Image: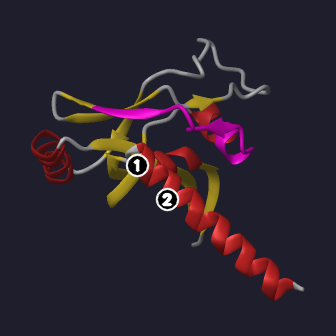
Amino acid sequence: MGEHVIALNKKAKFNYEILETWEAGIELYGPEIKSIRNHEANIAEAFILIRKKEAFLINANIKKYDYANFVKGIDPLRTRKLLLHKKEINKILKRVMLEKLTIVPLRLYLKGNYAKLEIGLGRGKKIHDKRETIKKRDIERKEMRKYKY
């Protein structure tokens, strides 16, 4: 029962320093899970809000499944509920309030037959931190080129 990554949020690790991660289920309709299995999902511009002790994934684009015979049209950018335990939600909410952190979706993947979302608690990076990250990445690339040839 391996994990099959569908979508990554590459900007999240560049813009945020990820402190802790959780795995959350997503409440989906039938045609949406078929679209996810076809790799037609994007979480690059998505974010997570907690309202009334429930977590929601907002602005995640799960493309409409072409062959679905679904009566009501499903909005690709609709708000989707995240399935987390209340203890986890309370822990996340407490850290967000006290430490001024942000909840960020990191990756969308399939675990068995279920779609899961890895969410992270992150602190925004400053401009100089981002530059430092770019420098480290460039140095690693140069070292890899040396070993390659």
Q: Residue furthest top?
A: 72
Pick the front one: 103 or 112: 103
What residue sits 59% from the left and 71% below the top?
2
Q: What's under tag 2, amino acid-wise? A: Glu
Q: Is residue 115 visible?
A: no
Magenta-highlighted residues: 35-49
* Circle 1 residue: 16
For mark 1, give the secondary structure: strand
Q: Which mark is residue 132?
A: 2
- Please give the name of the residue rendered at 59% of the width and 50% of the height, measured from the top-left corner: 8
Quick one: quadrant of the C terminus?
bottom right
- State the image quarter where residue 70 is shown: top right
- Percent position of residue 126, x then y: 38, 45
x and y, in percent, of residue 104 in the image: 39, 43
Estimate how packed mark 2 is, as few (under 14), some (14 to 19) or many (20 or more) residues with alpha carbons within 10 Å: few
Image quadrant holding the N terminus, namely bottom right
Q: Is residue 115 magenta?
A: no
Residue 117's place in the image compared with 81, above or below, is: below
User: Is residue 38 magenta-colored?
Assistant: yes
